[in-house]
Image: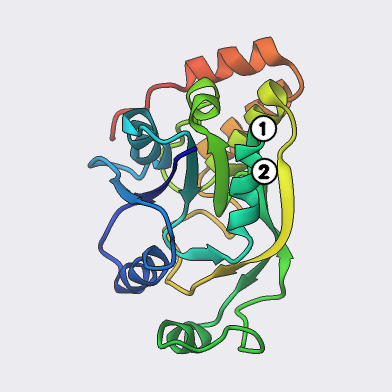
Amino acid sequence: MTVSVVIPWRGGCPWRERALEFVRSKYPWPVTIAPAPDGPWCKSLATMPAVEASTADVLVIADADVWCDGLDLAVEAVAEGAHWAVPHTMVYRLSEAATVQVLAGADWHGLPLAQWPYVGFEGGGIVVARRETLLEVPMPIFEGWGGEDESWAMALRTLVGPPWRGDADLIHLFHPPQERMSRRWGSDEGRALVKRFQAARGNPAAMRQLLKEVGQCPSPA
């Protein structure tokens, strides 16, 4: 069974560029850097074309600023039959100073954090899935930052079932935050769309219809 990594990407931030260089070197499988098209950021429009073009059986969909040492167990779980897997439970957001040290080769354990550790969203950070699952349940299209990860997880749970979930730690390297409405929400439109996914949760027909409806990214203003 073949494995490949897809990292949705848009350049322009030196912190994220250094993080990408760091995490890319840690993957033992081929890595595709999947650029987002021009216009407002759409994570799905970076990710899904790379998924469609891939010939791998199992795909790791990973943000450019995270790493998880338990990733091999999640890949193994999918190879053995799980539709999708989340390798981590807790998220550790490193401070700016800690990130500098880690990029220079330091062990992250015991270094200062930007906030208290928390349980990560399913669908966010790193997701491992069969390619056929990703084509059946594509990442929904959100314009701008936020909302797509948790909405995608709701769609996956509804249409293929709960993930295999590991207990490893996800390390998030520091970078300046994206432009957004608040820490929790990217925009009012994104928040409203998440609520629609919440309403469709557990209803396969409604979820498929919603995924079909949001299958085209809104045109840039």
Residue 9: x and y in percent read 33, 52
In this rendering, is residue 183 above or below 111? Answer: above
Camera-side residue: 83 or 141?
A: 83
Instruction: Please name the residue shown 42% across and 67% down the image.
Output: 23
Query: At label 2, which amino acid type do we have?
Result: Ala
Instruction: Please name the residue shown 41% across and 36% down the image.
Output: 56
Label 2 crowd (10 A; few <14 / some 14-19 / many >=20)? many
Residue 132: x and y in percent read 51, 24
Camera-side residue: 74 or 181?
A: 74
Q: Secondary structure at mark 1?
A: loop
Residue 163: which quarter of the image?
Answer: top right
The image's colour scheme reads rainbow
In this rendering, is residue 1 above or below 209? Answer: below
State the quadrant of the C terminus: top left
- Residue 81 is marked as 1
154 displayed left or right of 93:
right
In this rendering, is residue 87 above or below 22? Answer: above
Q: Can the viewer see residue 147?
A: no
214 displayed left or right of 17:
right
Query: At label 1, which amino acid type do we have?
Result: Gly
Camera-side residue: 70 or 48?
A: 70
Cβ atoms at labels 1 and 2 below 8 Å apart:
yes
Residue 153: x and y in percent read 64, 37
Residue 45: which quarter of the image?
Answer: top left
Q: Secondary structure at mark 2?
A: helix
- Residue 77 is marked as 2
Instruction: Please name the residue shown 67% across and 10% down the image.
Output: 205
